[in-house]
Image (cartoon, rainbow, N blue to C red):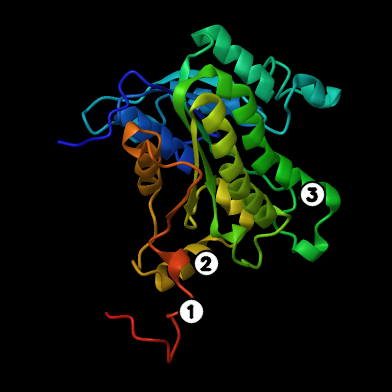
Amino acid sequence: MLSIDLTGKRALVAGVADDGGFGFAIAKALGEAGASVCVATWPPALGIFKTLLERGKFDASLALADGGKLGFEKIYPLDAEFDALDDAPAELRDSRRYRDCGDFSIAGLARAIAADFGDDGLDIVVHSLANGSEVKNPLLQTSRKGYLSAIGASAYSNVSMVQRLGPLVRRGGAFLSLSYLASERAVPGYGGGMSSAKAALESDTRLLAYEAGRQWGHRVNVISAGPYASRAASAIGFIDQMVDYARRNAPLPEPITAREVGTTAAFLCSPLASGITGATVYVDKGFHAMGVAVDREGAVATGE
């Protein structure tokens, strides 16, 4: 039987702070496929995430199909807006939510992984990170600072992670990030520069695939997932309407699930996808293929 087998592989999933988003679903799918899984968590959410884990609040979500339970090999602090610790303002480093985290930068994460697992201790790196401080602002009302912040946190952070973690990934490794259709289509309300950040993320994926492929033999891909009502997505303010609109107009008229994104990620990070790199893979029930809405009076036949 052909199956996804990641036995003996170690994965790092950056951007896991609860059990409700794509990052957690990807971590779980990688674990179910046999990988050992480490996660990196935003410092302000790190304490409560660890506490909820210790108290068993995520036990139901951590249950695996074989009856086991997903465990995280390591949990690292990470604020991917900063390449090095010195890039973070002193008042942030000294704040209550950051001061006990050590080096929470991307470079600090790389050093911690090298210290824990050596210079070739990873096989898979997943970038499940996005932030736009002005995401509710139309682009015409977005400041330069907000726009560049969205690009830095949501797109350049992936470049920085490949730069610093690429040498720590065993040859033939896999990098994966998460995008959204706003990278190529206008989605009014998805503002603050986030659509531009997703477009940059997808463009960078193609060039990183070439550069990381030639330098280390790594593959670099991105999943463009349909709208999903995670806790993080609630910041957009109208995520439920986005989910409903996509459901009503997709070829498969149903919402996507986090597990569908997770299992696609496990495939793309596995040897079964050894010929796939530089690709944007859609997990959206086919919504991206549609050129006209079909949920209105007088629309073309749905075939139902």
Quote the CA–CA distance across marks 1 and 2: 17 Å
Packing grade of label 1 (10 A; few <14, some 14-19, many >=20) is: few
- Quarter of the image with the C terminus in it: bottom left
The foreground one among 198 and 213 is: 213
The foreground one among 116 and 255 is: 116
Kind of residue indicated by mark 3: Gly
- Quadrant hosting residue 42: top right
Give the percent coordinates (x, y) of residue 92. Answer: 79, 26
User: Residue drawn at (62%, 36%), measured in percent from left and top?
Assistant: 158
Packing grade of label 2 (10 A; few <14, some 14-19, many >=20) is: few
User: Residue drawn at (33%, 81%), measured in percent from left and top?
Assistant: 302
In the picture shown, does residue 178 fall above or below 182? Answer: above
Packing grade of label 3 (10 A; few <14, some 14-19, many >=20) is: some
User: Which residue in the protein does label 3 denote?
Assistant: 146
Which of marks 3 and 2 precedes in the sequence? Answer: 3
The mark closer to the camera, 2 or 3, is 3
Which of marks 3 and 1 precedes in the sequence? Answer: 3
User: Residue drawn at (57%, 43%), measured in percent from left and top?
Assistant: 205
| Disc number placed over residue 241 in the picture, else none | 2
Which of marks 2 and 1 precedes in the sequence? Answer: 2
User: Which residue in the protein does label 1 denote?
Assistant: 292
Q: Are marks 1 and 2 in contact (CB under 8 Å)?
A: no
